[in-house]
Image: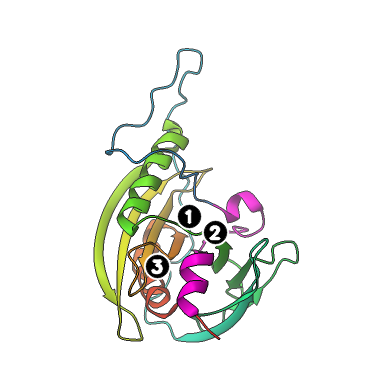
């Protein structure tokens, strides 16, 4: 029953944001561009048409936010999400100690765990399931990024990998990971996206996106590793 709930019902999107007011608005709270488009090899960003001249590449404004620490203590959370038109599902996930839950009554399919300053947080959202392997889902997002991000946002793909990670239950989890940077407004954002296939299923059942600043890379990697190994449905 657990496997049906996760692989057949929902994908989890986990976003960790850094910077003043990052969770204040819907646009900033959802930093990932559209992943629409067919999978194809990596290429250059689309060339603007003559009627739409490209703008100069943005110069990012430096952030004085201290880097996210490593060696954090983590606690397990149990929470329920209700995807639109679907039954409620209880989930389990570990996040850094001291981060508290925040819910929007208008968004029953998601929860957020925020630090005390509300500068950083984890967003968990129930959305439509993927029928792709982690590697195929990764490639599809790359295509979508290339199509949706204008040249002035200075999109850079830093890394794309696939590997097998052991979950806390001892079972193998096939994962694909994409790391990129871009400048959505004024600050350079560092984004890690991971797709996870749970044991016994080749399809990506979980999608996580963790977003911060370039200096947060080590801390983001730790939060991602903890979330990857601990997320699962309960009940």
Left or right: where 3 falls relative to 24: left
Q: Which residues are magenta?
A: 1-30
Residue, disc 2: 19
Element class at badge 1? loop
Check contact, mark 1 vs mark 2: CB within 8 A: yes
Observer-side mark, 1 or 2, equals: 2
Left or right: where 147 falls relative to 119: left
Quadrant occupied by the C terminus: bottom right
Residue 94 makes an appearance in the image: no
75 to 116, vertically: above or below: below
Residue, disc 1: 63
Magenta includes 21?
yes
135 to 75, vertically: above or below: above
Q: Name which residue lies at 42% across and 82% down.
A: 72
Q: Name which residue lies at 49% across and 45% down.
A: 33
Instruction: Check residue 220 in the rendering and tell me which mark sits there, or answer none.
Output: 3
Magenta includes 213?
no
């Amino acid at each position: 029953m657990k496997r049906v709930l996760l692989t057949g019902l929902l994908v989890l999107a986990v976003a960790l944001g850094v910077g003043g007011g990052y969770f204040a608005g819907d646009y900033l709270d959802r930093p990932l561009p559209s992943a629409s488009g067919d999978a194809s090899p990596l290429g250059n960003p689309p060339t603007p048409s003559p009627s739409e001249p490209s703008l100069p590449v943005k110069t990012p404004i430096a952030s004085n936010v201290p880097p996210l620490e490593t060696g954090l203590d983590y606690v397990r959370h149990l929470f329920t999400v209700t995807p639109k038109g679907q039954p409620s599902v209880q989930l389990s996930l570990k996040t850094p100690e001291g981060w508290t839950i925040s819910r929007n009554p208008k968004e029953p399919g998601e929860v957020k765990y925020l630090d005390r300053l509300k500068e950083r947080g984890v967003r968990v959202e129930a959305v439509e399931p993927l029928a792709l392997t982690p590697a195929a889902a990764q490639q599809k997002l790359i295509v979508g990024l290339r199509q949706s991000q204008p040249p002035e946002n200075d999109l850079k793909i830093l890394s794309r990998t696939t590997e097998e990670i052991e979950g806390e239950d001892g079972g193998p989890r096939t994962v694909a990971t994409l790391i990129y940077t871009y400048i959505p407004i004024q600050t350079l954002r560092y984004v890690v996206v991971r797709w996870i296939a749970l044991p016994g299923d080749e399809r990506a059942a979980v999608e996580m996106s963790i977003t911060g600043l370039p200096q947060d890379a080590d801390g983001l990697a730790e939060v991602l590793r903890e979330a990857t190994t601990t997320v699962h449905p309960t009940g």
